[in-house]
Image: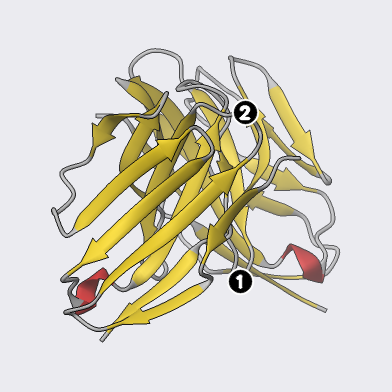
Amino acid sequence: GDSVTQMEGPVTLSEEAFLTINCTYTATGYPSLFWYVQYPGEGLQLLLKATKADDKGSNKGFEATYRKETTSFHLEKGSVQVSDSAVYFCALSIIQGAQKLVFGQGTRLTINP
Amino acid sequence: DTEVTQTPKHLVMGMTNKKSLKCEQHMGHRAMYWYKQKAKKPPELMFVYSYEKLSINESVPSRFSPECPNSSLLNLHLHALQPEDSALYLCASSQRDIGLQYFGPGTRLTVL
């Protein structure tokens, strides 16, 4: 079935470090791909999305490129801030009667000053 | 306005209580979703309503009963819950049943 695999956390970095969170997927067809972020005690916020191969999603300094050949959608940021500390979920959308989001397990990111 | 609101923010209930969670959106979206999220886990889909009709029920126990009284409102009625049902319950909506989902802040439920 369709699935998403994220790198295991937690990930701890110093402020201004480079961030990569790996995400790979298995899907039949061509799903849309998403990164959602969840800050402590809050719901999920869409961070960025890509709907077809080679699309690059970007927002707030974060980027991810939809790579069909490697079935990947890795999240990157050049210089992280303390305020980026959160849990990051990679997800794909599939249509089974209606749209369903399939989430990865989440990666907890902590940025130290 | 891209906001989905949920009430209450927190709810504590006993196993014999009946309570309801409420979700509201005024974006004109025609699909609404309930998710359950346990600590340190991703959200799990429970129900999908499309044009006020239930289109997906992910084999959720009958002690959870969804209701969509109109296109802006989604309720989740709770009855005879178990302690393992304690979780964050998230509501989401999308423009139609294929589209970007916007999430609410969630209701944190504790069952004693």
| Residue at the image position 51 percent from the left and 69 percent from the top | B8
Circle on res. B74: none
- Answer left or right for B32 relative to A12: left
Q: Is residue B79 left or right of residue B48?
A: left
Query: In percent of the image, x 40 and y 71: which residue is there?
Result: B39
Q: Position of residue A9 (x, y in %)?
A: 50, 64
Say what amino acid the circle numbered 1 marks. Pro
Could you say which quadrant of the image residue A54 lies in? top right
Q: Which residue is mark 1?
A: A40
Disc 1 crowd rating (10 Å Cα; few below 14, some 14-19, many 20+) is few
Q: Which residue is mark 2?
A: B28
Q: Amino acid at mark 2?
A: Gly
Image vertical order of residue B60 relative to residue B108, above or below: above
Q: Tell me the element at label 1.
A: loop
Q: Secondary structure beneath disc 2?
A: loop
Residue at left offset 45%, top offset 28%: A93
Image x and y of residue B78, in percent: 26, 63
Hey, which quadrant is residue A87 in on the image? bottom right
- Residue B106's place in the image compared with B9, above or below, is above
In this view, the mark in front (1 or 2): 2
